[in-house]
Amino acid sequence: MSRTALERYALLEALGLYFDGSGEPPREVVVKFGEATLTLLGTDDLPITHWALASLRRLPGSMPGGTLHLAPGLESEERLEVSDPDMIEALTLVCRDLDGPPPPRSRTPLRLLTGTATLVVALVALYLAVPLLATQIALLVPQARQQMLGRAMVTDLRDTLGDGSPVRVCDAPEGVRAMSRLMTRLTRNDAEGGRITVHVLDHPMQSVFAVPGRRILVFRGLIEAAQSPEELAGLLAHAMGHVLAEDPTGRALALARPLEMLDILFGRIDPETVARLAADLPRTDYDDETEAAAIARAAGLLREAGLPQDAGRELLIRLTEEGDGPLPHAARHVAGAPPAEADDTRFLPALDDQDWVALRGICDR
C-alpha cells in the first residue's frame, strides 16, 4: 500500500450500509478510513467492527461509478456497501488486493501479527498464560461478532433443551409489552442497558443467564417462581450487571480452547465450538470478583429504577434451598450477605398488577 495514499486519505469518513451476516436488515454506519483498518461505527459513534485494509475484497455486484460491495475476506458473511466516491477512490487506490485472491487462512498467532491485530494477539498470548485476562480480551471483540456468537448460542440452547423441536420463544403480545416495560424501568438511566435483548423461553427451568451479544435468557420456570415483579427485576438486573461488563463473552473465551478463541476473535465461528460453549456456559460459575461486581452493578440499576436494591434476594434464597437456583454462585454471595438496610421511602411497583399478570402469561398462546 502506498504511504502517500494512506496519508492522503487519513481519517476519511463516509456513510455505508453494514450487513452482519445474520439475515437481519442492514444498519447505517459511519465508515472511517484508517492507517491499516477500516472502522465501522454505529450512529452513536461506538465502533461495531474493524476490518484490516489488506483483507478487504470486492464482491460481485459492484459497478464502476456505482456502489462498492466489500467483505473482510471472501469467506466472511459480513459485507458493506459504500456509495461515496471519495471513499471508493481511497479503497481502490490503497487496497491493491481488492480483486485478488483471499489471503491463506492460518491458525498460527504469528501469522496474525500485522496492523492493529498486533495488540489483540499480544493479549491473546497473555491470555494463554493468564486465563484471568479473558474478560479484558472480551472488550476487544467487536460487538457484531459477539452478537453472532450470542445468536448461535441461543439457537443451540433452544435445540438442546427442546424435546425433539426447539424450545419455543414466548411471545404473547401483552406479555412481551410487559417485559419491555420492566426492562425500560431498569434501563431508563443507562444507554447501554437499552441495547439488551431479552428472550423468554417456554421451559420449566428456574433460571436466567446472559449470553454474548447483550442477550439475556429468561425461562418460564423462573417467572412462575417469582412472587412479585420486583423479585424478577432483581434477577434481571443481576444478569444485566454481567452483560454490561461483557462478562458472558469473557467467560466464553475462558471456556474456549486456544484455537477456538482465535476463531471467535478473527475467524468464522464453528458450530461445534458454539455447541460446546452453549452447554458449558450456564453450568460454569463466574469468579468471586466478577460476581461481586455484577451484584454491585445490579444494586445500582435497581436504585436508579427506584426499586429495592436487594430485590430478588429472597427468590434466589428460595431457589437455592430448593436445589434449583438459577445463579448458584450469585446465590451464595447474596444469601451470605446481610440484607440491604431498610428504606422507608415508598417505591412504585416494578409493574402494575395488569402487566404482572400479562408477564406471567407471556408463554400462553
Image: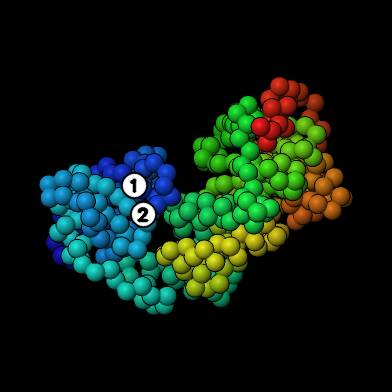
Say if 102 sits above or below 340 in the image: below
Neighbour class for label 1 at 10 Å: few (<14), some, many (≥20)?
Answer: many
Callout 1 amino acid? Tyr
* 108 to the left or right of 194: left
Give the structural element (helix, strand or loop) at label 1. strand
Whole-percent x, y for residue 152 in the image: 53, 55
Cα separation between marks 2 and 1 = 8 Å
Whole-percent x, y for residue 174 in the image: 63, 26
Say if 26 sits above or below 248 in the image: above
Q: Quadrant of the C terminus?
A: top right
Residue drawn at x 24%, y 44% is 14
Q: Residue furthest right?
A: 321
Q: Which residue is mark 1?
A: 18
Q: Nearer the viewer, residue 7 or 280?
A: 280
Say if 310 sits above or below 345 in the image: below
Identify the disc placed on residue 78. 2
Q: Quadrant of the N terminus?
A: bottom left
When asked about the image quadrant of residue 36, the answer is: bottom left
Whole-percent x, y for residue 164 in the image: 65, 54
Residue drawn at x 74%, y 48% is 205
